[in-house]
Image (cartoon, rainbow, N blue to C red):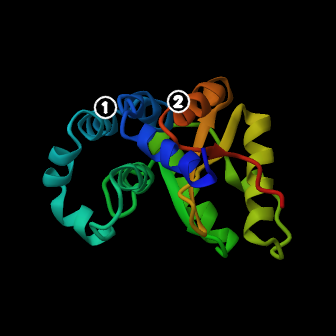
Amino acid sequence: MGMFDFFTKKTLDLGEVDYSKLIEISRILSNDNRALVDDATLMADDYEKFQQAHKKWCSEMWEDSLDRHNARLLIAAYWFVGYETAHRFGAYIDWKEETEDILWQLKSAIDSLGYSLHLNKIVFTGEEFTDEALDKINAYFLVEGYTLVTLDTDSDCYHLFIVPNEKLDRLIYLGQSIGYTFFYNYKN
């Protein structure tokens, strides 16, 4: 077996992914919001039907050239954070985002989730790079019983979510089971 055979095997295995795990992932990321769980159920059960139901949004987000697995990853990431959708369960930021913009987006997610987190308790110097600001935010969340996680989309942006600590291991496991990676270490 050559090196390229190894990668081919991994690609073939992705065709057999049980996307029903998206349903429980959406419950964790949205604090069990019924509307998002319904959307995730449609994504998992009938991907094409989800695309048809949200044709304009899907077509504006990316090209049809993506393979099905990566398309589902991007749909989930952007849909769950609320990028141009009604949902606000996370934050979408660029790799070089102003701290105030990060906090503004996370505040919206906190409100949607119904969590009692107060971002004004975090002390910033105003000189933090994005990863430093995310690390400070995560340090505060950890003390409060939450973790700031990112769904890795293999890009230079962050899809951020706030997860209760007791659900973190389950989220990471569910993500791994469908080829999605969640991380929470922002230090380089």
Question: Where's residue 93, x and y in %?
Answer: 56, 66
The front one of 3 and 62 is: 3
Say if 10 sits above or below 137 in the image: above
**Is 127 placed left or right of 165 in the picture?**
right
Answer with mark 1 or mark 2, whichever residue precedes in sequence: 1
Q: Which mark is residue 174?
A: 2
**Quadrant that contains the C terminus:** bottom right
The front one of 63 and 41 is: 63
The front one of 55 and 143 is: 55
Q: Nearer the viewer, mark 1 or mark 2?
A: 2
Crowding around mark 1 (Cα neighbors within 10 Å: few <14, some 14 to 19, many 20+) is: few
Q: Determine the CA span between mark 1 and mark 2.
A: 19 Å
Question: Where's residue 54, x and y in %?
Answer: 19, 56
Occupied quadrant, residue 83: bottom left
Residue occupying image coordinates x 46% and y 47%: 11
Say if 22 sits above or below 170 in the image: below
Residue occupying image coordinates x 58% and y 46%: 6
Q: Amino acid at mark 1?
A: Arg
The front one of 135 and 18 is: 18
Residue designated by label 1 = 34
Residue occupying image coordinates x 44% and y 37%: 13
Question: Where's residue 37, x and y in %?
Answer: 33, 33
Which type of secondary structure does the marked residue at label 1 adopt? Answer: helix
Q: Which mark is residue 93?
A: none
Which type of secondary structure does the marked residue at label 2 adopt? Answer: helix
Farthest front residue? 1
